[in-house]
């Protein structure tokens, strides 16, 4: 690109939106990455706590294994890079990435408890409601 004067090239001095010091740009990128790590941790905890819900049907089977493995790997990486020693926020971040394992355990225990209660229900307490599926309206002539 040529400047107004034919003997000088445009050096791009008008581009002041980028920081001149590369360390400032790296600090900005690190903070953005840290926010994304926090958001991913919260999403993982939510997905693990709701692993038996119908809207997470793709999570069943290998999805559970991937969720557990990813949370263990993320917690190990955070420990490796010393986030545990970076104050309360760093410790909370490591604990956040340990929560998907605990929330999956609680979700599975809750599912098993509900399944046990349904299978142990007494037949007399489970009467059909009056309506479309009751026996007196199913075969009634019109």
Image (spheres, rainbow, N blue to C red):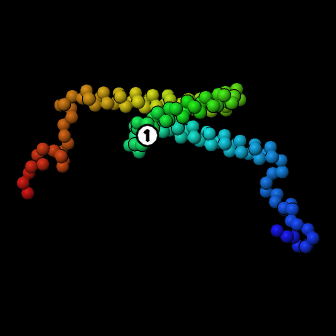
Q: Locate residue 71, reporting x and y percent.
A: 55, 33
Q: Locate residue 35, reporting x and y percent.
A: 65, 42
* Residue at 30% in and 27% down: 116
Extreme front residue here?
Answer: 7
The image quarter containing residue 56 is: top left
Quarter holding the N terminus is: bottom right
Residue at the spot of label 1: 59
The image quarter containing residue 18 is: bottom right
Extreme left residue here?
Answer: 141
Quarter holding the C terminus is: bottom left
Q: Residues within 10 Å of mark 1 (few under 14, many from 20)?
A: some
Say which of 31 and 73 sits in front.
73
* Residue at 75% in and 43% down: 27
Q: Locate residue 136, reporting x and y percent.
A: 11, 46
Where 12 sits versus 124, above or below? below
Residue 130 visible? The answer is yes
The image quarter containing residue 123 is: top left
Where 131 sits versus 97, above or below? below
Number of labels in the image equals 1
* Residue at 62% in and 39% down: 37
Disc 1 element: helix
- Looking at the image, residue 49 sits to the left or right of residue 123; the answer is right
Say which of 84 and 130 sits in front.
84
Q: Locate residue 91, reporting x and y percent.
A: 65, 28
Residue 50 visible? The answer is no
- Looking at the image, residue 117 sits to the left or right of residue 67; the answer is left
* Residue at 41% in and 38% down: 60
């Amino acid at each position: 690109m040529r400047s107004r004067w034919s003997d000088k090239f445009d050096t791009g001095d008008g581009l002041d939106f980028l920081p001149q010091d590369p360390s400032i740009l790296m600090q900005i990128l690190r903070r953005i990455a840290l926010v994304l790590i926090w958001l991913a941790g919260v999403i993982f905890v939510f997905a693990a706590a709701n692993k038996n819900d119908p809207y997470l049907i793709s999570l069943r089977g290998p999805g559970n294994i991937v969720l557990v493995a990813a949370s263990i790997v993320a917690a190990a990486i955070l420990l490796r890079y010393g986030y545990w020693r970076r104050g309360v926020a760093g410790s909370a971040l490591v604990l956040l990435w340990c929560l998907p394992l605990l929330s999956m355990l609680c979700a599975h225990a809750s599912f098993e408890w509900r399944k046990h209660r349904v299978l142990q229900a007494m037949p007399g307490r489970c009467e059909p409601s009056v309506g479309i599926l009751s026996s007196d309206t199913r075969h009634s002539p019109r």
